[in-house]
Image (cartoon, rainbow, N blue to C red):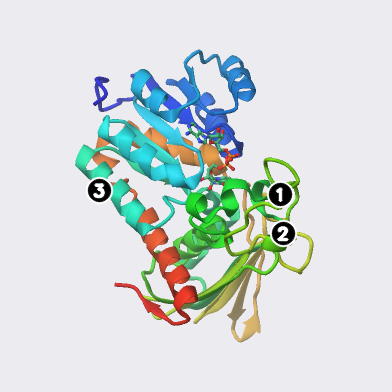
Amino acid sequence: MSDRMLPATSDRRLRVGIIGIGWAGRQHLAAYHELPNVEIAAIAGMETGPLAALGTQYGVSALFQKWEDLIEAADLDAVSIAVPTYLHAPIAIAALERGLHVLTEKPLARNGVEGQRMVDAARDAGRVLDVVFNHRLRGDIQVLGDIIRQGEIGRPYYAKASWMRRRGIPAGGGWFANQDMSGGGPLVDIGVHVLDYSLFVLGEPRVTSVTAVTYGELGRRGIGRTTPPAGGDSPAVFEVEDFAAAFLRLSTGATLVLETSWAAFRDPVDLIDFSVLGTDGGAELKAVGATDTPVADLVVYRDLDGEAADYKPEAEQGTNHAGVVDNFVRVLRTPEEWEDYDGSLALERARVIDACYQSAAQNKEVVLA
Ligand SMILES: NC(=O)c1ccc[n+]([C@@H]2O[C@H](COP(=O)([O-])OP(=O)(O)OC[C@H]3O[C@@H](n4cnc5c(N)ncnc54)[C@H](O)[C@@H]3O)[C@@H](O)[C@H]2O)c1
């Protein structure tokens, strides 16, 4: 158990450790670095050269190659976990058991069983377990959520959302395409973002049943890579799906249809989108270029006195990882909110993704409890 005194009130400097120095870990580093009264006290990553460079860049001398050493040695309040997905649960549980707060990258874990253990560990420790769902912090998604909450389109009854890539197998495959390390392909990787922002925009209805399909037609043939697989040009292990689609029934009576791909013969420009039909209007959000398009095209369809009164709401660029990290630190300084941040929303997402994989494997609808 960490001997650092908590709660971490606003006048005490928080000491955080970052585990993982790939793309995601670097977003965490940059975000903490901007915050007052927060010290990046330790960094872990297996790439020695980049690790040393990041130590210099952020003035951090406690550098570790193994996450176990970081958790053991550094006197921390919290850790950020930005490593391959199979390590999220063991690292989070070890950190929580030492009394550290945890911010982990999405997905929470490879599956709901691992996720449940993480949530249990957070509850037992009385510590925060938060998960990076940065896409719901897109400015356009926030605006759309506000519009729906304010009732402008009436009751939403049908929504469609996707994140589609033509050639977007991450890191050319690597651990992302290894079933045991990742838990799955685009569905658990980027589909979990689409699921999260869709349910957020729709007001957090419960998913009551799922019918899904997955296909692995292209990735295993080397189609859809932008970079060669780590370890050379030899054909990478590709064990996961490269496309998934799901039909979700929601507790409100609404339906949500999801699609996601890492590799697909489609428009070469990536796409993130969401469209919804409601009883008094509809809306469409389209980020052509996906994450390269910081503000999507957004249209609201409505009638006024029987005439079309469609409009394009303005949206700001979202706050992304900076917003997630900022909120995590705010919560650490607000102990009365800790209970609300036990990872259970991310666990719900994990259970829906599990149900999708189960539905696809068994070729049938799966009802969620
Ligand atoms: N929220 C987002 O937008 C977003 C985007 C990309 C990735 N991610 C998530 O972030 C996580 C990492 O993805 P990435 O693309 O940065 O991966 P990556 O492969 O680029 O980096 C993984 C890092 O983990 C480190 N690592 C692996 N095993 C370790 C160990 N035993 N001890 C210490 N460090 C270890 C590696 O050294 C590396 O620095 C994944 O869960 C992924 O889903 C989230």
Question: Ligand 1: does it lie within 8 Å of the C-beta at label 2?
Answer: no
Residue 342 shows in the view: no
Q: Which residue is mark 2?
A: 270
Q: Is residue 139 above or below residue 349?
A: above
Q: Secondary structure at mark 3?
A: helix
Question: What residue lies at 69% left-to-right and 49% top-to-bottom?
Answer: 172
Which label number is shown at residue 292? 1
Which label number is shown at residue 12? none
Q: Amino acid at mark 1?
A: Asp
Q: Amino acid at mark 2?
A: Asp
Q: Earlier in the sequence, mark 3 or mark 1?
A: 3
Q: Which residue is mark 3?
A: 120
Residue 327 shows in the view: yes
Question: What residue lies at 42% left-to-right and 46% top-to-bottom?
Answer: 131
Q: Is residue 170 above or below residue 2?
A: below
Query: In the figure, residue 250 lies in which quadrant?
Result: bottom left
Q: Position of residue 145 (x, y in %)?
A: 50, 61
Q: Amino acid at mark 3?
A: Asp
**In the rendered view of the protein, which quadrant contains the N terminus?**
top left
Alpha-carbon neighbours of circle 2 within 10 Å: few (<14), some, or many (≥20)?
A: many
Q: Residue furthest right?
A: 268
Q: Position of residue 2 (x, y in %)?
A: 27, 23
Which is closer to the viewer, label 1 or label 2?
Answer: 2
Query: In the figure, residue 162 lies in which quadrant?
Result: bottom right
Which is closer to the viewer, label 3 or label 1?
Answer: 3
Q: Earlier in the sequence, mark 3 or mark 2?
A: 3
